Image: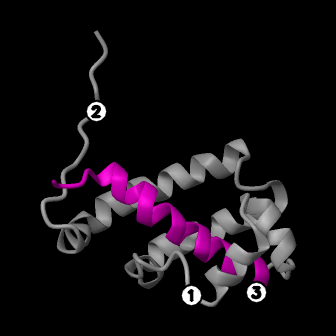
């Protein structure tokens, strides 16, 4: 059964973004793994795994895209200040997901044969 792009976002893109943000929180913003974990709502062990690339690296093409990495760097700054669940951070996260869809849907199709886009639901 083919996957919808929304499934790919939830299962692979969001964990990859969290991994990249966690890595920047520790390396660029000099947070401890515990503080970074609290900012993004995961455990310290998860941050450790993100930093060792054991978790969240399935969509490695994100780290190779300069525009997406610029957005992730901006997001990490917001997260360092106010956490991942702040309104500004969630808005930026949504923008990153849209950017991935626009720029990398064809790459995602290669990883997930039969991938389908979810069409917006029209309101009556």
Residue with the most extreme left position: 114
Which residue, given by chain and number where applicable, does mark 2 sit on?
A: 120
Report the magenta stretch's main SS: helix
Which circle's residue, 1 or 3, is located before the other in the chain? 3
Residue 106 locus on image (x, y percent): 20, 68
Q: How far apart are marks 3 and 2 (CA)?
A: 38 Å
* Residue occupying the point 79% across, 61% down: 39
Q: To which quarter of the image does residue 82 belong?
A: bottom right
What element does badge 3 sit on?
helix
Which residue, given by chain and number where applicable, does mark 3 sit on?
A: 27
Which residue, given by chain and number where applicable, does mark 1 sit on?
A: 53
The answer to whether the residue labelled 1 contacts the one labelled 3, judged by CB atoms less than 8 Å apart, is no
* Residue occupying the point 85% across, 77% down: 31
Q: How far apart are marks 1 and 3 (CA)?
A: 14 Å
Residue 77 locus on image (x, y percent): 74, 66
110 with respect to 12 (left or right) = left
Label 2 Cα neighbours within 10 Å, binned few <14 / some 14-19 / many ≥20 = few
């Amino acid at each position: 059964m083919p996957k919808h792009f929304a499934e790919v976002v939830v299962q692979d893109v969001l964990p990859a973004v969290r991994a990249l943000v966690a890595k920047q929180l520790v390396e660029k913003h000099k947070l401890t793994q515990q503080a970074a974990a609290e900012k993004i709502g995961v455990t310290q062990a998860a941050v450790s795994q993100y930093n060792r690339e054991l978790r969240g690296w399935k969509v490695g093409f994100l780290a190779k895209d300069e525009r997406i990495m610029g957005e992730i760097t901006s997001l990490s700054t917001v997260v360092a200040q106010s956490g991942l669940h702040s309104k500004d951070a969630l808005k930026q996260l949504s923008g990153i997901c849209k950017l991935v869809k626009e720029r990398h849907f064809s790459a995602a199709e290669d990883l997930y044969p039969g991938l389908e886009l979810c069409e917006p639901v029209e309101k009556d």
